[in-house]
Amino acid sequence: MRHPQLTVFFLITLFFSRPVNVSSDSLPLSTQSRWVVSSSGDRIKLRCVNWSGHLHGMVVEGIHKQPVKDIAARVASLGFNCVRLTWATYMFTRGHHTNLTVAQSLERWNLTDAKAGVYKHNPHVLGLNLLEAQKAVIDELAAHDVMVVLDNHVSLPKWCCADKDGNGFFGDKYFNPHEWLKGLATVARLYKGNPGVIAMSMRNELRGPRQNRRGWYKYIKKGAEIIHRTNPDVLVIVSGLSYDTSLRFLKQKPLKLNIGKKLVYEGHWYPFVDPTEKWLYQPNEFCGNATRLFIDKIGFLQIQFPFFLSEFGMNMKDVEEKQDRYMSCLLAHVAEQDLEWALWSLQGSYILREGKVGMEESFGMLTANWDHVRSSEMQSRLQLIQQMNRDPKARHRSYNILFHPKTGQCAEVVEDGIYLRDCKSWAKWNHLKGGPISLMGGDRRCLAAVGEGLPAIVTSNCSSNWNMVSGSKLHIASRDEHGRYLCLDWDSSGASGSSRILTNKCLCLGSDLQDVPRCEDDPQRQWFKMIPSNHK
């Protein structure tokens, strides 16, 4: 131990009070109806990635692989404006953790290679204590205009999550609620006045046999109000029960907090418990059911409050068909609602996870050595949701973007043809249910189906009517001149970066456009979504 605990606390408080190199013109953030807004009332959309710092060594992952400044620059270059940075309660409440240097913490677990890696890539960090090291990462992110949401992931530093891991609910073995409140207050105090930290998420994935609503209301209220009282600038993010998948009980008893315009709710959406056969053989119906269930259990809050989808993701190393379809379904909903979000995850590997040194993270945006993007396909799929499509202050006429979640591309019109291209620009469409899909601006031209296997066209003949069909509501169907129902379809054989939109027989649908009981085809190529937008 380098210093007595009180002396360390005083020195850390001075250290944390230094300004960071980030523009604070738009800070602090607050809420306005369902939006996160700047100090001037402009919407700020959180498009984040998770970055772990809560595991055994309590060191932010990856600093043994690459310089922090390079990782921060990579985060920004990938289009993220925010990091959900995870932390463990004990790091801030227990002196034998708080006072450790990075070197000492790694030595405790005999992580000599990781220590050597930190010395190589970030030698200035080794002698910092754990709190100082965390702040150094946050400051580097701020220098690249990347905001931070501090997420209390666990109490005992370890991998999360399981029903009986002792970290699940208030009163569990490692989850003393009074210590938890102390940890929240300490973190809120240490980052008070630091513009790099814009929000605090109170607890990740409450769960387990002890979870109950009474305890949730009691301690969530205490936690939210102690954060706000200590640091009134930060947003306060509230999570639900059952691994952050359920806040349905708020329909009967709303949470009453005295924290001003700082309340944000969060939820998670993974396909882990979904039956594989449903995604593979009944994907249209199951996508619709999964989306409705998400809205009913937790997503309904997006009507009244900012809603932060703080975890979602898929295996990007060995892509599984089930997860690939889930991702398209989820992206269609996130884009349609223009939600705040955080992908799991940034890290390509861990220093130490579940007893394994150097475990690879297949859900990570970066490779195991943190030097390359793991999946350019995922990078492409995030394009549209990384943009702000709804601006509460905009006075522009609303329109629709034709979005293809499988590729992450948007429809653009070239002469009379329709192509999928990167979402840097797009055609603006107008559509009323059951009516024509027409281009906005200039002479009226409309989308039309010519025939099966043929390119869809834009024509002055606006007699074609289109409907969103199937259980997923992701098929867009019309009749051709012979009266046959055809759906928009992606021509995957097109050149890289640009492919034509065709019309074809609707996959996994019968002649009446109803979902068939079992389908061997992958309908994702025909999944399109009309995304409402008023962005100029």
Image (cartoon, grey):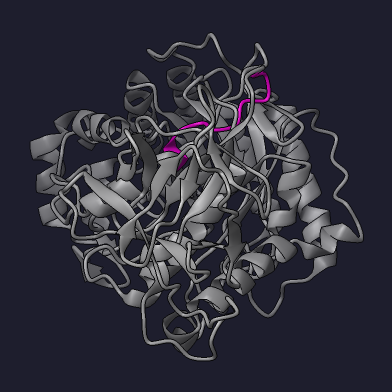
**Residue 114 picture location, percent across and down:** 15, 52
Q: Is residue 142 left or right of residue 88?
A: left
Q: Which residue is more in the foreground, 352 or 534?
A: 534
Q: Is residue 91 among the parts visible in the rendering?
A: no
Q: Is residue 174 left or right of residue 482?
A: right
Residue at the right extreme, as displayed: 252
Q: Is residue 219 above or below residue 303?
A: below
* Prevalent SS, magenta region: loop
Q: Which residue is more in the foreground, 119 or 141?
A: 141
**Residue 145 picture location, percent across and down:** 38, 21
Q: Is residue 255 left or right of residue 367?
A: right
* Residue at point 13%, 44% (across, down): 371
Q: Is residue 262 above or below residue 436?
A: above
Asked where in the image residue 462 lies, by quadrant, the reply is: top right
Residue 485 magenta: no
In the image, the segment drawn in magenta is: 385-394
Q: Is residue 272 left or right of residue 142?
A: right
Q: Tell me the quadrant of the picture where the N terminus can be found.
A: top left
Q: Which residue is more in the foreground, 122 or 272?
A: 272
**Residue 283 picture location, percent across and down:** 49, 77
Q: Is residue 278 among the parts visible in the rendering?
A: yes
Q: Which residue is more in the foreground, 127 or 282?
A: 282
Residue 387 magenta: yes
* Residue at point 27%, 59% (across, down): 491
**Residue 98 picture location, percent across and down:** 43, 43
